[in-house]
Image (tube, rainbow, N blue to C red):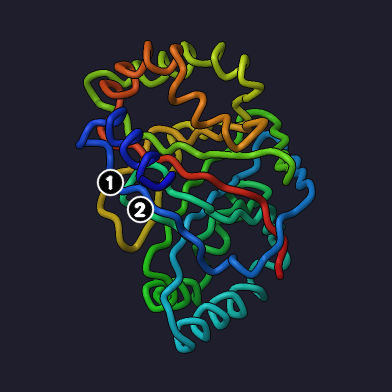
């Protein structure tokens, strides 16, 4: 039995059929990039940050559309303070049917700055190119209510969990995160950012916005597996199960362009 099969059986045993989509590795459009040694991005209160998750359409024609999409946006956003901040490779989708190839963060000085783009007369036509460029493109956005420093170190390991709350028990997911934190600490892991109630935008997925994106830094790659086997996780798993109607978990790492 392969290690991949063992992991698949372990995840399937722990997560109910309502939550599990599939377990698969995903290397995509950032596969040519190299791990970034350390990426530190500092944001200030009031900034609008967006995490994207994407699956590129294959072929030269789609690649040309993506290139044109960004080329047309650049002149509009140059003076608006738009910034591409962090590139992330998705190395594995542990839980969930959505298997993004790439993730990352970009930002604006404020929501008002982004609105200038939204109101630009050319924006609607540019935005219509997305389905031709990406099979999937999901954008999760949040205006910060406090300063934030995000650090991604290639010597560490990272996951992002995307959770859709059960409307009847939305508090249970928060309870789960609080109750397993001591276990994370014992494993030298920590929460680095929780994006709460993000604005959600996509051209493909009809589901409503998730309740939270939770980023965790792990000291070792094995840390996640040890966590899933831990007493702290097993004891509190019911809160995760009962507090969500949908759940995704991805392994990610910072990259620089190759």
Image: 27 above or below 206: below
Q: Nearer the viewer, mark 1 or mark 2?
A: 1
Quarter of the image for residue 76 reads bottom right
Image: 186 above or below 118: above
Q: Is residue 201 visible?
A: yes
Q: Residue at x 30, y 22 (%)?
A: 243
User: Label for residue 98?
Assistant: 2
- Alpha-carbon neighbours of circle 2 within 10 Å: few (<14), some, or many (≥20)? some
Q: Residue at x 62, y 79 (%)?
A: 71
Q: Residue at x 45, y 36 (%)?
A: 161
Image: 135 above or below 253: below
Relative depth, front residue between 225 and 20? 225
Relative depth, front residue between 40 and 159? 159
Residue 84: percent from the left, percent from the top?
67, 58
Which one is earlier in the sequence, the residue at label 1 or at label 2?
1
- Alpha-carbon neighbours of circle 1 within 10 Å: few (<14), some, or many (≥20)? many
Q: Are marks 1 and 2 in contact (CB under 8 Å)?
A: yes
Residue 5: percent from the left, percent from the top?
35, 45
User: Label for residue 21?
Assistant: 1
Residue 18: percent from the left, percent from the top?
20, 36
Quarter of the image for residue 217 reads top right
Relative depth, front residue between 181 and 42? 181
């Amino acid at each position: 039995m392969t290690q991949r099969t063992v992991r698949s059986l372990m995840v399937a045993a722990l997560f109910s059929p309502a939550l599990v989509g599939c377990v698969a590795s995903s290397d995509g459009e950032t596969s040519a990039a190299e791990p970034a040694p350390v990426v530190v991005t500092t944001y200030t209160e009031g900034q609008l940050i967006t995490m994207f998750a994407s699956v590129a359409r294959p072929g030269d024609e789609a690649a040309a559309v993506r290139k044109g999409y960004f080329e047309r946006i650049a002149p509009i956003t140059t003076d608006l303070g738009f910034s591409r901040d962090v590139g992330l490779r998705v190395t594995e989708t542990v839980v969930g049917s959505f298997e993004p190839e790439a993730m990352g963060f970009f930002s604006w000085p404020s929501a008002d700055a982004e609105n200038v783009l939204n109101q630009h007369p050319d924006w609607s036509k540019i935005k219509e190119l997305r389905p031709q460029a990406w099979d999937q493109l999901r954008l999760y956005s949040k205006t910060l209510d406090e300063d934030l420093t995000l650090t991604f170190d290639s010597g560490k390991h990272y996951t992002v969990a995307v959770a859709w709350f059960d409307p009847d028990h939305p508090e249970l997911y928060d309870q789960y995160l609080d109750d397993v934190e001591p276990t994370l600490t014992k494993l030298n892991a920590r929460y680095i950012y929780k994006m709460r109630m993000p604005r959600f935008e996509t051209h493909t997925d009809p589901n409503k916005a998730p309740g939270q994106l939770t980023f965790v830094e792990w000291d070792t790659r094995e840390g996640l597996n040890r966590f899933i086997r831990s007493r702290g996780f097993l004891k509190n798993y019911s809160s995760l199960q009962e507090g969500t109607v949908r759940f995704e978990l991805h392994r990610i790492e910072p990259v620089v362009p190759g």
